[in-house]
Image (tube, rainbow, N blue to C red):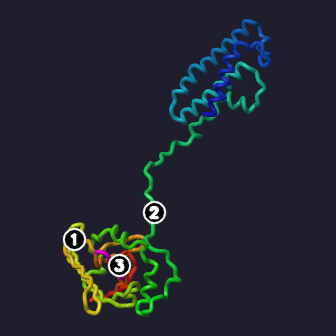
Amino acid sequence: MKIIIPIICLLIGLAVGAKFFSTTETAKEISLLPQSKTQKKLESFNKAAQKISNIDLLEYIKLKTMKEKYEKADEILGKIMLLFLANVQLEMNKDVKEYFSTSKRPTLKNDIPKSISVSKKKESIEVIISPFKKFNKKNLGKIENEDFSDIEIKTAKFELKEPYSFYKNAKSATELKEVFRVYGKFEGELYRTTGKTKGSIDKVLLEIKFMQVGDKLKGEYFSELRRDGVAYSTNRGSGYNGQVKLIKKPKKHLLLQMSPNSFLQVFPSNESEVIIGRFYDNDEYAGLVRVEKL
């Protein structure tokens, strides 16, 4: 602590200088006294300085808190100044003399702030890395079918960067209220935007009937894709839900399994029985979808 360093140096100086006190210029008044009185003065001064160094400094080094050390250091400083005032007639400022010679000198008890307890528990900061591609308006307007151009505009900003990985790591919905908007039977169209069948329109069938069983969903799930009246992808299952996945952040939506390698990314609306979204196949965006509840 910075405050105790000059105090220690001062005490050392007092102990060493006590032997030569009568020869210093600062002790002229004491040296003019008779030898017996001068000797007694020196002995008294030496004992007082020795007491401070042996007792007070020993107490100081045993203190543990900074508050206690500050208070003890201030106490030692006060004693040293009183020692000077009583034994050495130095030319001190009047305010300094009054400060140390009266009982009005304040302690540090009210000056040192109480220790502030800082909770070690760190606040959890959730960092959300967007799974969506960087949205660019310039990429819009490439849909030739006008019936799906509006769907492209509404869903373009939510196109996934890594569709398969995103679907695989997503968690299945566990509450009936989470799948309420896709509960029931739906029929609609899938507009292909890539591949050999680009521009074609396939038929989409969905039938989802789950019930709440404890903290999970259980029931039947059916999805099918047809082209020219022929089913080319059928997904049927029963038991606990593994086909409908809920995404809460950064944008709430659902992922509906169509096959092991394909799924729909849909955004149900509470104001309409129509559901729109994007279709992903073999880890890439492949079309736009629009289905309506029957």
Disc 2 residue type?
Val
Residue drawn at 35 percent across, 78 percent down:
281
Disc 1 residue type?
Tyr
Q: How many marks?
A: 3
Q: Earlier in the sequence, mark 1 or mark 3?
A: 1
Residue 207: x and y in percent read 24, 83
Residue 240's disc is: 1
Please give left or right for residue 129 compared with residue 71 in the image.
Answer: left
**What's the CA distance linking mark 3 and mark 2?**
29 Å
Of residues 242 and 192, the one nearer the viewer is: 192
Residue labelled with disc 3: 281
User: How many residues crowd mark 1 within 10 Å: few (<14), some (14–19), many (20+)?
Assistant: some
Residue 260: x and y in percent read 28, 74
Is 167 drawn above or below residue 88 in the view shown? below
Provide the residue span drawn in magenta. 260-269
Of residues 27 and 98, the one nearer the viewer is: 27
